[in-house]
Image (cartoon, coloured by chain):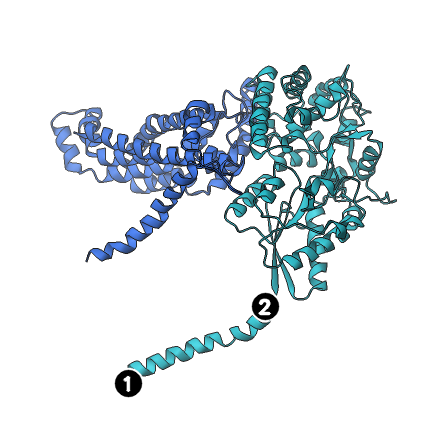
Amino acid sequence: MAWLVLPGLAVLVFSLAVPLGFSVYYSLTDWDGLGAYQRVGLDNYRSILTDDPVFWRSLRNVVALIAVTIFVQNPCAFVLAAFLSRLSSRASRLLRTIYFVPAVLSLVIVAKLWVDVYNPTFGILNKLLRAVGLDALAISWLSNPSTSLAAVIWIIVWQGFGWALLFYYAALMTVPRDLEEAARVDGASWLATYRHVIIPHLYPVISTVIVIDVISSMKQMELIYLTTAGGPGQLTQFLGVYLYQKAFVSGEYGYGNALSVLFVLLSAGLTFLVQRGMRVLSR
Amino acid sequence: MKTKAFVIYTLALAALALLPAAPAGAQTKVTLKMGDNLPDRSNTWGAIVEQINGEFKAAHPGADIVTESYPDQPYQQKIKIYATAKQLPDLFKFWSFTSLLKPLIDGGFVAPLDRADFESLGYRPGALDTNTYNGKLYGIPVSMDFWVIYYNKKLFKDAGIDHVPATLEELYALIPRFKAKGIIPMTTDGKDAWPLSITFDQLVWRISGERGLPRQALDRKIKFTDQVFVQAARALQQLVKSDLFQEDLMVSDYGASRNLFGQGKAAMYLMGSWELGLGTDQAFSAEFRANVDAFKFPAVKDGKGAVDDLMAWYGGNYVVSASSKNLALGKQYLMFYAKRFPELAWEKQATLPAQTVKARPGDTPVAQTILRIISEARATSGTPALDLSTPRFKDDNENAIRELCSGLITPEAFVKKLDAAAEKAAKK
């Protein structure tokens, strides 16, 4: 019966292992994607790690995004989910739908929407700020070097919030009521109930959400590409956009492939670490 | 028995399904796959291509044309990806530049053309040369491109301004007057950076009075760190810092900046002569179309260059894919296009073609100005520096320009980056 795994294995090999193999091969060349190429050994990797500030900037931005999703988005989504789980089912369904709307919108629409919201000339954000007398705050959010990264991270968090909320809400509904009641009978406050009973019960879900957050932060590409394309300068550059630009804009296909190999390694490593961390935490 | 009947029934069905396919196969048209950067097919340039395609199909009943169109930058990337995947369209619009066309030629992706076929078609001097590599013609130039500033006469009047600026100082003096009226003084595409890079080249020329300094720096005869480049970088950074442009310059793309001007929110638009179609673009109001005009890029105080030193080149072209199965038909299309386009482009006032055209009584004011500017030019630049070298240099150049104009690096650091990029490209 072992042959039954073959179709699945074949898909995995041809959709993952073979392309990755090609990537590794081309990452050792100076191919521009079009003509002849030479093998350059580990040169691409060496220059990425020692001589490419944009790579490190992209990585820093990824870390910032991960930090914001884990330490800001997740707690907010959890608190809101806990609040929703106490409401009547009708009210909670309505609110959940509202919070989930951004998550079902197409990325292109979300990007265009926020580019317009942030627009310094006709954007609604600056209009509101001016209306309440905060003219000094009415700046060009996406192109101002001091706000651009926060502005794009906000869009990503805004869109991803619905997912986190949905996960936490679904998980909270699975917590057995008697567990909670037992804690309360024992005199636990609501805070203690959440801290010692409910949250430990939800560790597997929290761990899953965090892994998803880490992976989606790592592979963040489309939204950045559609809003700032990494600018101003390279301040909002992310690994996904950067490797695409290297491969297909600046014609450094070999270098782009080296970036993508590092990207895979980093993603795998980080996911492993997060899972490890969560396991230790849930013990 | 039942199984046998089922098999016969299935086979009969399959045969039936195949029957209508046979005669249709005999009549199959030859489909030419085309690609271009003109997504708007009902206006100006895109509409002209549609008309040419219609006429070509009428003249070649067996031919069909399927076009894929994207805005400029995504289109360039798409073509590179198609080339890498060996799926280029049969013929496509591209750019004659070393940074874009040469890698395709070196990779054997573009079919050479017979230059003699095109020499009698009225091209301006040098137009075919920019599409010639290793002594062979690889593309037909379509437009004569040069750097100008478009302006909206009504918005100038609304701000009480009765003249176009002849110097950068005059230009700076206009900024507060437009701002007081809630008008954006000028727009351009900052996100893609190449317009700012061309402006940098223009400033180098205005300051030095010497043609082709960036090319010399790329050839490593001089250095980008020389004083003139620092001065030009300073001037460019000052242009951006002076509130001349839309606030979100560095993240607003081609379409967004063009719309700000076309919708009457900005008084000036820094762009190439290929936008002379603004005067006939139905997407904008009749009032705008009647008021759009152009002027020469201003002079720089104490600069040695003159306003008639023109950043001008032949950028856009059409090429045929070397691996096209319909090579002969593709070449016939190019010939058809080369003959029809200049006449239609000028008749519809869509762009200034690479072939010479004559002024006509019905020309829009902006078209008349564009013709006047090119006729008054005392020297032209040729291809801008960012497109004279490798794709990597182009990308480095654009990134350095983005950093300079975002105020992230000093003019001195900018020229150092440019010089390092040129050094890298020269070694390649």
- Look at the picture and state if B177 lies above or below A240: above
Q: How far apart in space, not on screen, are marks 1 and 2 (Cα)?
A: 41 Å
Kind of residue sitting beneath label 2: Thr
**Nearest the eye: B279 or B409:** B409
- The residue that mark 2 highlights is B28
**Secondary structure of residue under mark 1:** loop
Tally of numbered tags = 2
For disc 2, the chain is B
Colour of chain B, in one word, is: cyan
Q: Quadrant of residue B27?
A: bottom right
- The residue that mark 1 highlights is B1
In the rendering, at what x and y percent does residue A235 appear?
Answer: 49, 24
At a point 66% along the width and 17% down the height, the residue shown is B238
**Nearest the eye: A180 or A158:** A158
At a point 34% along the width and 79% down the height, the residue shown is B7
**Nearest the eye: B315 or B114:** B114
Q: Is there any visible trace of residue B402 in the rendered image?
A: no
- Look at the picture and state if B274 lies above or below A10: above
Q: Is there any visible trace of residue B133 in the rendered image?
A: yes
At label 2, counting other C-alpha atoms closer than 10 Å, the crowd grade (few under 14, some 14-19, many 20 or more) is few
